[in-house]
Image (cartoon, rainbow, N blue to C red):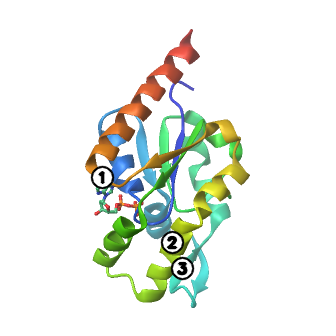
Amino acid sequence: MSLPNILLTGTPGVGKTTLGKELAARSELKYISVADLAREGQLYDGYDEEYDCPILDEDRVVDELENQMSEGGVIVDYHGCNFFPERWFHRVFVLQTDNTVLYKRLEARGYNEKKMTNNIQCEIFQVLYEEALASYKMEIVHQLRSDKPEDLENNINEILKWVEQWTKAQSS
Ligand code: DAT
């Protein structure tokens, strides 16, 4: 494997897609949105009436990604992280956004009140950070601020620097 696999996770609206696509544009890494993959392949297992969204078929998502993950060089984006095999990822980044900023981003998406409350609570209680810590070795889990454009730029630079170091260490 010549390039590492990276997981970008966090509450919807924190900036995973923006960061993932920009990283892929500036490197050899490939960006995969699990939400898009599921939509395209209809990798669902029923419908959640309460949350008004399809239920992800996690096993089929894992099967679908397995080959690419074993080759390396993949950035996976999803607002959940406990069903991926732990061995897949070399680094897990949990993006975090100030509540007021996140509220505005979700409002712009036209989320209803219930969905807004759920997501803001998810951010306040650091649900995805806890999930990441429970699912991966602590030392590979990192939090990233994602409030402002400067944060995006810093995060891209930090991650690309780490990818370069990882790649060098692999080949030496
Ligand atoms: P996610 O994929 O986590 O749902 P996104 O990448 O779609 O989030 O971003 C949600 C919105 O926030 C989108 O309009 C872009 C904006 N955004 C993302 N990262 C940002 C940052 N660091 N500074 C300012 N705006 C950002």
Residue 89 sits in quarter = top right
- Vertical comparison of 58 with 90: above or below: below
Element marked by disc 3: strand
Amino acid type at circle 1 is Lys
Q: Which residue is mark 2?
A: 42
Mark 2 and ligand 1: say if the CB distance to the nearest ligand atom is below 8 Å.
no
Query: Is 17 positioned to the left or the right of 83 in the image?
Result: left
Mark 1 close to ligand 1, CB under 8 Å: yes
Residue designated by label 1 = 148
The quarter of the rendered structure image containing the C terminus is top right
Secondary structure, mark 2, is loop
Q: Quadrant of residue 128?
A: bottom right
Residue 32 to residue 117: above or below: above
Residue 48: x, y in percent?
59, 85
Q: Amino acid at mark 3?
A: Pro
Q: Nearer the viewer, mark 2 or mark 1?
A: 1
Q: Residues within 10 Å of mark 1 (few under 14, many from 20)?
A: few
- Disc nearer the start of the sequence (1/3): 3
